[in-house]
Amino acid sequence: MAKLTGNLRISANPGSEGVRPYFEVMFVPYAGRLATRPAKANNYDDLVALLIELKFNEDDATRWAGKARSQGMILISSFERTDTLLRDNGLLA
């Protein structure tokens, strides 16, 4: 159970013709080559739930989700979690 440190990038995708809007959450490690992949949240509530599963408290999760919704893209720096937690939530392959 190794701890990984990096940035968590959350970007709002407004959607296009035939594609509904969604949020994309991506773990970007500081060092090393890891097989990362984005996790998708279909709406604001799903994004808050995903952030809570990533061990953010409820207040921080709603604050970050609100910023992502209003600003379009945010970067949470110094994000440190275990590799199993990231893998269980779909951020690592």
Image (spheres, rainbow, N blue to C red):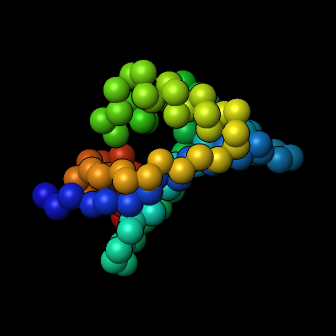
Residue at the spot x=13%, y=58% of the render?
A: 1
Q: Is residue 88 left or right of residue 61?
A: left
Q: Which residue is nearer to you in this view: 87 or 76?
A: 76
In terms of image quadrants, where is residue 22? Answer: top right
In terms of image quadrants, where is residue 23? Answer: top right
Where residue 87 appears, as percent x and y from the top left, is: 31, 54
Residue that extends furthest to the bottom in the rendered view of this protein: 33
Where residue 34 appears, as percent x and y from the top left, is: 36, 72
Q: Which residue is nearer to you in this view: 30 or 50?
A: 30
Where residue 39 appears, as percent x and y from the top left, is: 49, 50
In terms of image quadrants, where is residue 7? Answer: bottom left
Residue at the spot x=54%, y=50% of the render?
A: 75
Q: Is residue 15 left or right of residue 4?
A: right
Where residue 83 appears, as percent x and y from the top left, is: 25, 57
Q: Is residue 20 left or right of residue 31?
A: right
Residue at the spot x=39%, y=66% of the render?
A: 29
Residue that extends furthest to the front in the rendered view of this protein: 78
Residue at the spot x=31%, y=60% of the render?
A: 5
